[in-house]
Each structure stands twice: as structure tokens, then as C-alpha cells.
Image (cartoon, rainbow, N blue to C red):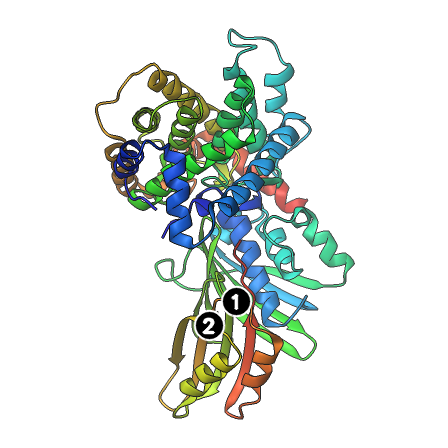
Amino acid sequence: MVSILDIIGPVMVGPSSSHTAGACRLGLIARNLVGGTPEKARIELHGSFARTGEGHGTDKAIVGGLLGFRPDDDRLRTALEIAEREGFAFTFAKVKLGEESEVHPNSVRITVERGARTAVMIGSSLGAGRILVNEIDGYPVEVHGNHHTIVLVAEDTRGSLARITTLLADDGVNIATLRVSRQRRGGDAFMVIEVDDPPGDEVSEHIRALEWVRWVRRLDRVSA
Amino acid sequence: MYSSLASAIQDAESRALRLSQVALEAESLDHGRPVAEIRAALGRALAVMREAVGRGAAGDLKSASGLVGGDAAKLRHGPRGPLAGTPFRDVLMRALAVQEVNAAMGVIVAAPTAGGAGVLPAVLTGLADARGLGDDALIDALATAGLIGAVVAERASLSGAEGGCQAETGAAAGMAAGAAVEMLGGTPAQVGHAVALAQQGTLGLVCDPLGGLVELPCVFRNATGSAIALAAVEMALAGIEFAIPADEVIDTMGQIGREMDVRYRETAGGGLAATPTGRRLARERLYQLKRT
């Protein structure tokens, strides 16, 4: 459903909603995956991001997102200098992530490191500032960043979904959408749970405490 | 939200309301937000629009590539043309100002998109200031513009990559014209005619930015798009009716967009981007960008 506030917005740093605002949101998601500003990041640009990204400030916008700046933050313009000053080491490369027909033209792979935490994600900027994260640590996902999202990897055991949803209900978290995928039968299951309100830290702790959960991350909403 | 302007206009007329009122009501129902909260959010957008106009009018901005910047100031301080001293020249100045801010990585409101962000603030604040109308009138106008934009998004597209510039500055011209007509006292039906009159004038407009950057001709397309919006406002308020309903003009824009060759949809493969000078400038400027 189209909202007036989507049309009259977002408030953003120019020049392009897809190449600047969307790129910044992808950086914010990657930051979320390691729980803060990474010490190191490798940013691999594909397609139109690679071809016209510099002129649109895509590089600054992604680094700004990794620093925690939102799409309307004036500091995006000088994000590269700020990152260098803060000792955040980033590198850029132009790559081909796949065939033109299969990979969205505005796509990026971001590899981040913070302390013991590392993460790799592939995401695309779909236009008008909307984004889609397609892959996290090799798992196919669909994260739009319009909700607060919990992503987790679990052993494929019976009743795992029921346990997770019960646990969320007990913590007072209301589920908006839920998707489960796995690479093969009996392999790890990947769950993407979009929720209405920001879940507290205890939710991640409770999920992490389940012995069959290998990995869990909380991703804050990155849309306006 | 409404998926046709005809249904919104009928709703407004049968209840003796303005389009902005039915738009705010529908938005409130759809998203469970009180009208006051929606108006406050539109007020914040308006403040950013005004700041961008002021920032760009100062005339000291340059885009990343250096291709655009400083032209809004020429309309402010440069030699007088036949329209000097009129709201028309002031509106053109504001459109260039906002787009120059956008190209220089300044803060703007993407309404409906970043590439078409100059038209709404230029037409609406320009005409409101000329008539001494305040923020309340402008917030209502933004609600009406949002309604028109939502209908365009639903029936056609608001993306240059999908539908060419007719879907960005063209849609913006329709939104601005319709919103301005309501702000200046026009009826809901006149708003519909203003949208149709503006968008018929931008049908087929291609998206052909040099080097794929939102700079040239985007900055100037916002000024010419605003001019088309003003023409539509003047005609609609004079009682001129466009025979094809706005919804059908919008559908036509969507159809043309779907049939438009990919070279004319933001890929820099055709149009001005593919001219000898366009290619040379893009090559030189992109090369410069990589070195800085």
C-alpha cells in the first residue's frame, strides 16, 4: 500500500535515492550484522553501482552507513574522511556478482569484521531508497529493512519454529512476517523474522541460549 | 490510498471536502496514524524543502563532477529577462536551487524522487510566498501532491529507470500542478485537469543523464518541469478542461514507459548522454572524479 509519506520523502542526502539513500541503508544493515562500526570492510560494487557509484557518492553512502549515519545525515558527504580518521579500514573493488539478468544492477557485497565477529552480505538497492538483502553469510534471505528483523541460523530440528515463536510471544514481541529457508534437508535452517517493535537485548539472549541455535543477529529497521 | 484520481475527486466532491482532506483521511485509515501526526511529518518535509531552496539560492555549490552548480544564483542576480520580477522566474530559480543542492550531496526531500525533487518545492513554496500563504496551506498542498503521486505510483511508475523522466519530473509536474491548484482555491475537478494538463506535456520524456549521474540535464529538467506545472496551473484555474481524464493520461505515461527502450531509462545509453559532447563530458568528469 502506497503511503503519502513514502511519496513525500524520504528526507535524504542527494543525489540519488537508489545510489545514495539505498546504498547508505545497505551499509547500515552490514554494520548491524557485526553490532557496530566495523574495524575492516571490503566493499565490492556490481553493475551500475560500479559504473556510476563514485559520481553518486555510493562509496561515501555505504561507508557512512557502516559508520552508523542514516540517509539524511549531512556527514555522509565526508564519510570517507571520517572513517579514515576513526581508523576504520575499508577497501573498494568493482566485481561482477553474477549475470546481468540474475543480479540487480545496483548490488554490492560487503564483508565486515569487528573484533571476533565477521559477516558477509549481498544486497541490492531497488529504487526510491528501498533495499533488499539477498544473502547473509551464504544463506539466501529477504531482508527489506522496513521492520526490526531477527535473523538466525538453527539446526534443522523438529519443533524449532514453535519454540522460537513461543519464546518471542513470551518476550512480548509481535511477529509481522516470518520466513524459513534451508540449504538442504537436515541442514541448517535460516529464519528471518520481521517484528513490529524493536526487540530488547534479552530476546537475542534467550534465542542464543537455545543449544540448537548456531547464530542470531538483530537488525534494526533502516527505513525512515 | 486511492488508486484513481477520479474516485478521490468524486469522494471529495460528494462530501464537499478538499482533496487534501480525503487524502489525509485515507492515509490515516491505511496506516493507523492520526492526521495531526501525518501533518507534522509533512511539516518536517516542508522545512527541509525550504532549507534546500535557501541553500541552493546562495549559489556557492558545485556537484561532485563539477558539471552543475551556481545557475540558480544567475536567475536571482543575473540580467533581467521578460519574466523578471514574476513568480515564474522565482519558481525556476527555486527548482534549480534544490537540484543543485541534491547534486552537491546536500539534504533534500525525494518527492517523488531525488532526481525530480526540485519541482514540488519550487512550484509550491514559490506560489505560496507570492500569495502570502503560510505553512498550513503548504502542508495541505503536500498531502494533495502525495495523493497524486500515490496514484501515479500505483497506475504507472515513479522511477526513471522504469519509465524515463516522464515518471520523475513529469510526475512531479503533475503533482505540483494539482497541489497548487487546490492551494490557490481550485475545485477537486480542477485539480484533476491540472494533473492531466501538466502530464500531457511531459509524455515520452526520456531519462538521459550524462554518465548516469543525476546532474545534467536533471537540474534543468526540474526547471522546465516546473514551467510546465505553472502552465497547467494557469490553464486549470482559468477553467480550461482537458478532455482526457487524468487517470488515463497517467496510464498512458505508464504504457509509454514500459515500451521505452532501455537506452532512455537512466542507463546513459541514449538521448543527451549519447551525444558527442555528452560522452566527452561524462568521460572527462568521471575520470576527474576517480582522481580526486
Q: Nearer the viewer, residue A182 or B144?
A: B144
Given the image, what chain letter belongs to the residue carrying mark 1? A
Q: CA distance from mark 1 to mark 2?
A: 7 Å
Q: SS of the residue at dot 1? A: loop
Compared to B190, does B150 lie above or below?
below
Judged left or right of residue A211, residue B266 is left
Percent position of residue B87, x then y: 52, 16
Q: Residue furthest left?
A: B243
Judged left or right of residue B129, residue A159 is left
Percent position of residue A97, x then y: 46, 64
The reply to whether label 1 and label 2 mark residues of one chain is: yes
Given the image, what chain letter belongs to the residue carrying mark 2? A
Q: Nearer the viewer, residue B284 or B186?
A: B186
- Precedes in sequence: disc 1 or disc 2: 2
Q: Which residue is mark 1?
A: A197
Percent position of residue B64, x then y: 62, 39
| Residue type of the residue flagged with mark 2 | Asn
Q: Residues within 10 Å of mark 2 (few under 14, many from 20)?
A: some
Q: Residues within 10 Å of mark 1 (few under 14, many from 20)?
A: some
Percent position of residue B63, x then y: 61, 36
Residue depicted at 36% across the width and 39% down the height: B22
Compared to B159, does A66 lie above or below?
below
Q: Are marks 1 and 2 in contact (CB under 8 Å)?
A: yes
Q: Which residue is mark 2?
A: A174
Compared to A68, does A57 lie above or below?
above
Residue depicted at 56% across the width and 31% down the height: B135
Q: SS of the residue at dot 2? A: loop
User: How many labels were placed on the picture?
Assistant: 2
